[in-house]
Amino acid sequence: MRPGYLWPLMAQLGTRQVALLSALVVAVLGGLLAGAAIDLKDTAIAPWWPLLCALLILGLAYAAFSIAIERFVHGRIKSLYRAVHDLRRGKSAAVSKAPVGDELTRVNAEVAEWASQRRTEIKELEERERYRREFIGNLAHELKTPIFNIQGYILTLLEGGLEDEKVNRDFLNRASNGVDRLMKIVEDLDMITKLESGVMELRMTNLDLHALVKETLDTLEMNARDKGVRLRNDVPAGTEVMADRNRMTQVFTNLINNAINYGKPGGTCAVSSYGLGDQVVVEVSDDGIGISGEHLPRLFERFYRVGKSRARNEGGSGLGLAIVKHIVEAHGQTIAVKSEEGQGTTFVLTLQRGE
């Protein structure tokens, strides 16, 4: 039998069979050595001496090999069970050290790697579940306010307010505004879903960024005047980018509107840009109330609000910045925010340079 066939045969043996086979080899070698060490012609028991030595060595070797192999295998199996047990309890599974190349060590390492992957997957699932619960809670809260308002106005009209000319039209207008806000939330959610799934196609064209920003600022000029905020277009004339015109108008409208709402009276909202390789970096900045650092990582989450100063009673769907982020990322670009409380806020996004 060639040596290459020995390993598959050994792999089919149990621990006791391996111990017995190893003990037999040692016993045979021990018997041969004992026979060679004495003179078979000088004593009557000499012919039986090698056999007795072999049997004695066989018993001792079998006991020693059995204990050693059982402890070795049992220790490795305990390590594997411990890894699985720690995984179920959410703990880190430690890998026991052993000689390099040992088969059980390799299996142990594979189990530890598997446990690490499962822990990562479980952590991701738990994070998604947390986000789902939080999202549903935020969505319910956003929908509850306009629905309760509409319900209150309608009940007031049904209970006699409809006949009162002083309140019926006013309450109907308020109910209509509540319906408009509900529609805005639903439309924004639908847009985010389409952007995430890739269903919404972008119509990429060569745009004059200076002209696009000017149009957006002109649209929001009246709102800025009411808030006492001055708007400034610092984008160099002739700056061209590749983007979807309607979606980028939506991006700038959201960002500039935020700067107006959270700016300070007499403050300034400025839109500027500069080239960076084959991209154009655009900054929308204000000198308003700013945002504390703890809120910045979550600012682009759906329905995320920053403290009392950005409360729900200020209107909006609470999805504006989430939509901005999705639109920019759908263009294959990035957006970030830098801000300090009381020092204003700057949104920085990139766009592909025009051809």
Image (cartoon, grey):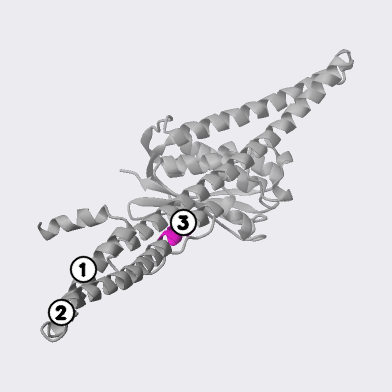
Q: Which residue is mark 1?
A: 25
- Asked whether disc 3 touches disc 1, contact meaning CB atoms under 8 Å apart, the reply is no
- Tell me residue 188's x, y (percent): 57, 32
Which secondary structure lies at badge 2?
A: helix
- Tell me residue 322's x, y (percent): 55, 42
Calculate the distance from the C-alpha at mark 3 to the C-alpha at mark 2: 47 Å
Q: Amino acid at mark 1?
A: Val
- Tell me residue 84's x, y (percent): 47, 54
Q: Earlier in the sequence, mark 1 or mark 2?
A: 1
Image quadrant in which the N terminus is located: bottom left
Whether residue 282 is visible here, answered yes or no, is yes
Q: Earlier in the sequence, mark 3 or mark 2?
A: 2
Q: Amino acid at mark 2?
A: Gly
Give the residues drawn in magenta, as a range: 77-83
Which secondary structure lies at badge 1?
A: helix
Mark closer to the observer (3, 2): 2
Q: Which residue is mark 3?
A: 81
Instruction: Name the disc covering residue 35, or none.
Output: 2
Whether residue 99 is visible here, answered yes or no, is no
Q: Residue at x 61, y 60 (%)?
A: 293
**Closer-to-camera residue (61/39):** 39
Residue 335 drawn above or below residue 167: below
- Tell me residue 256's x, y (percent): 58, 45
